[in-house]
Amino acid sequence: MKLTAKKQAFSMIEILIVVMIIGALAVMVGRGIRRRLEKIKVNQTKTTIASIKGSLLEYYTEKGGYPKSLDEIASYFDKGIIPKDEWGNEFEYNKPPVRYKNEYKKYEIYSLGPDEEESEDDIHNGA
């Protein structure tokens, strides 16, 4: 008796289905990772603003007032450079507050956030 081996292979449709499933999973995972990375950037920007705010307080303690611009506190940072937000933009600083004058009385500092325009996602702090 002669045994014959059946040759097994995947059909083109089976391969396409597997590729589509893998693609859909990659899109879902990619979106989740992207959202998480943006959240990390927002949190890091909040931390940087807190650091700048600490330097502003130190300046206030030494000079008796807040600076007119952030350039005046550059010496409080490594290499004399004011840090930027996580999207590579400089922080906005106003003394007295202009944009958030209902929240702060002495100064405001803010980042335009991920969309890099004035909107609801801006990250701000002040005194």
Image (cartoon, rainbow, N blue to C red):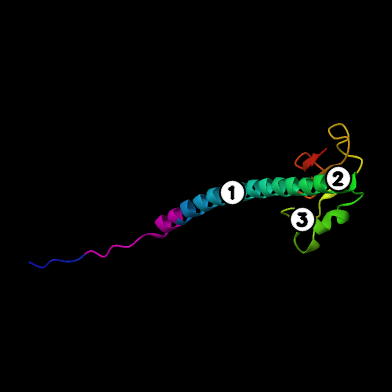
Front residue of 100 and 64: 64
Evaluate whether residue 95 shows in this view.
yes
In the shown orientation, is residue 22 left or right of residue 31?
Answer: left
- How crowded pointer 2 is (Cα within 10 Å; few <14, some 14-19, many 20+) is rated as few
Closer to viewer: mark 2 or mark 3 = 2
Compare marks 1 and 3 and give the one earlier in the sequence: 1
Name the disc covering residue 84, or none: 3
Say which residue appears at 56% left-offset and 52% top-offset. 30
Residue 55 appears left or right of 5: right
Q: Earlier in the sequence, mark 2 or mark 1?
A: 1
x, y percent for residue 88: 75, 57
Which region is colored magenta?
6-18
Gap in Å between the C-alphas at discs 1 and 3? Answer: 26 Å
Labels 1 & 3 near each other (Cβ < 8 A): no
Q: Position of residue 125 (x, y in %)?
A: 78, 40
Image quadrant holding the C terminus, namely top right
* SS category of the residue bearing label 2: helix
Residue identifier under label 1: 31
In the rendered image, the quadrant that contains the N terminus is bottom left
Q: Nearer the viewer, residue 9 or 86?
A: 86
Q: Is residue 85 magenta?
A: no
Near mark 3 (Cα within 10 A), the count class, few <14, some 14-19 or many ≥20, is some
